[in-house]
Structures are given as C-alpha cells and as structure tokens.
Amino acid sequence: MPDPLEHWLAHIGRQHPQAIEMGLARVGEVSARMGLARPARHVVTVAGTNGKGSTVAFIESISREAGLRVGAYTSPHLLAYGERVRIDGHQARDADLVEAFAAVEAARGDTPLTYFEFGTLAALWLFSQVPLDLAILEVGLGGRLDATNLVDADVAVITTVDLDHQDWLGEDREAIGAEKARIARAWKPLVLGDDDPPASVLRHAYAIGAPALRIGCDFFFEPLDDARWCWREVGRTLELPLPALPAPVQLRNAAVAIAALRALDVEVADAAIVRGVAGVRLPGRLQRFDRDGVEIAVDVGHNPQAARALAAWLRATPATGRTHAVYAALGDKDAPAVVAAFEGLVDAWWLGGSLGAGARGIDVEALAARLAGSVAGQAARLHDPAAALAAALQAGLPGDRVLVFGSFHAAEEALRALRGPGSEAGESRIV
C-alpha cells in the first residue's frame, strides 16, 4: 500500500504547472474559504537571504523555555516533511499532515496552488486546531508575495539581505530588500540583522511607521570568551552561553531572535533566554560527524553570503590536515561566486550533481562547466552528493576535514549517507 503522506506530497506537487508562482490572490482565496484566522495570539514572521531557519529555531526554543505554546513553520525540510511544521517542539505527525492537506484540497476547488502554498495553508490549518501563544513563520521566498505574508506579523524580522533568487526578487540588494520589507506591518516592530540594511528597507519602515530595530544600533552582541557572549540594549545586558550551533554567524542569529522577542508583547525571563539559546539543535547547520578520524561538516549553505560565512568558520577553526569540499549546487545558484569565497581554504574539491533535487537540479558536468577556470572546475566529478562524499572520505586521512554544502539537497543526501538506512523516512523536495 502506498504511504498516505507520500501520496499527498506527490499530489500537491502536481497541482500547479510551475514550482514557483509569486502572488497572494490564489492562496488568499483558498485561505478565506478555509476560514483561517490568525494562527496564534502573537505572530513573528522571519524573512532574509540567510539565517532564517536558525533564527526561527532560537525564537522557538527561547519561547518554549518561557512557557509559551509555540508553532513554527519552516522550509525546506531535510529528511522528512514533518520538519516543516512543529507544535510544542514536536514535528507534525504524518496523519495530521494528511488531514491538513485534505482540508486544503477540499477548499481549493479548481484553484491551482504551488507546493509551498499548499503546505503553508496546511501549516496554518494545523496551527488553528490548537491554542497557540506564538506562531513563527519563515518566509519561503522574498516576502511581499510569499504565502506566509497572508498573516499580519506582530514583529517582522529580516535576518540579512544579499543576492539570491534575483530572477524573482530583483538584481541588487535594494530591490531584494524592498521585497522582503513588505512583511512589516504599520506601527509594528521590524527587527533587522544586517549591519548595513538596504535603504529600501529603512524607507519602507519609515513610510508605514514600523519601528526599525537595528543590530549594531539598537541592540548589540559580542563574544566574551570561548564559552560566553553577551547581548545588550540600552539599560540591559545579558551574559549567555555560546550556542551549540558552531558557526560564528549563529551569534548574530541568536541576537536577532532575542531582539524579536524583546519587541514582542510577551514576558520572557532572562533564564529562559539562557536556556533557549543553549538548547537549539538544528540539522544541516555545520552538523558534524567523525569517520575514522576524518571530520565531516554538513551545511545547507547555498549562496555567496552563506559561502562567506562558511569560509569564515574554516578560517577560525582550521583542520589539522587537509580540507576537502564536497559541493553540489542547484542550477539557479551563482556557483562561481560561491566557490570564490573559499579561495586558499580548500585543498581538494569534489563536485556532485543535483538532478535528484528535481526541476532546479543540475548534472555535474554542467556544474563543472560553470566553474571552468577555477580550481573547483578541475575537481573530481561524481553523479550525486552522496557519491562525492564517499569519494572524499576515501581520499581523506585522519585529521582531514570534509565540508559538504551547496544546497539543501546536498545536505540531505549527505545526512542520509552518514546516518544510514534508518534516515530514509520522508520525501525531500527543494522548493
């Protein structure tokens, strides 16, 4: 018998001729038919080029430590679709997802919905079934026309603005920032994680009366030593343990999360912030393994800004031996700019194809052609990320490091290979 959830995931992937179609008209119409109201008493919406998933996880963890009942919606997933919808820290059960998909299907009639739109409505329906204090919604793409923007946020967050998805959002940071800024609501706080946010973001916040809370201006963070860091604003300083998530950029994500909760009209004790920051675990964010003395780090980083953050981590924590990079990108990413961030940091490159990711995938020869002229363009070429990882591990010696990155698909394939057959549950779709 076919798995009911797998059946539904295949079904919702066929309901729209395009993987992405920006706009709120269709999804808003179906939402109205479903009678969906606010998903929780408070709502935080998180947009940004990078750091969205980690920031959501920090907000979720701190809020739960404060005793709030929390729902979180994120995308994409790595190993199982249920990762996208969490209530009280638990992934949605397959049976509940099936029920939610059926509710969306019954309401949509002949209105076509994309995979992401279908999933967003299902998540909002699941949140509506339980009394939640807080719903945290991660924007899928951009902000203005993203399905999550159906919901009015009490606090909007923009983690970073950089170049990605230019075909949809615009060719520069100003255009992209203008799209992301539209998740803000009039007279509601907008928390910004960029040291230098685009002027378009600040202009929009000013135009609608949204107080802009800027990192480096209204709140601050700094490491203290190997085990501690501090977050501060005027009149308040918190000394905190370092997050378990190892990348240096996670301090910024945690700082933004704390600022978002400070801007929300809820009571969060300092002790809850301490426990919440320390308690976050998130797969695919420099998730590390050891194989016979070779360190493996798996990361979902897939654009130039994320590559620069990974490069900073490599510089800060050099391997005792050689560094191998397993890189598998999707076809719509700026692969040359990603690879350029690692100049002088990688001793051996291993390229993997990503045809298993679906329509946005690319075969390894095409990826290598895009990287012609770079060191990575001359790398070993394998048909998929798992094969590239296996080849890198075979070449590795104790003390070496293997970094796997380039897409959620690359991270998923690496995690399945490293975890073995027990991780096969769930279908992955990069949307």
Image (cartoon, grey):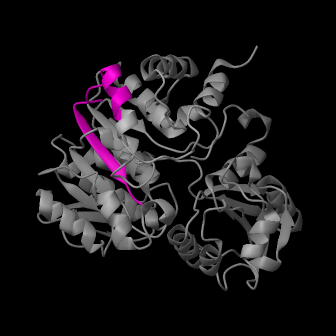
237 or 75: nearer the viewer: 75
* Rendered residue at 36%/68% (across/down): 175
* Rendered residue at 33%/52% (across/down): 144
* Rendered residue at 60%/71% (across/down): 334
Which stretch appears magenta? 28-48
Q: Say if 234 sits above or below 120 in the image.
A: below
Query: To which quarter of the image does residue 133 belong?
Result: top left
Residue 322 at x, y percent in the picture = 76, 76
The answer to whether any part of residue 71 appears in the image is: no
Furthest toward the front, the residue is 110
292 to the left or right of 65: right
Q: Is residue 336 magenta?
A: no
Query: To which quarter of the image does residue 1 belong?
Result: top right
Furthest toward the top, the residue is 1
* Rendered residue at 60%/65% (across/down): 333
Residue 158 at x, y percent in the picture = 33, 59
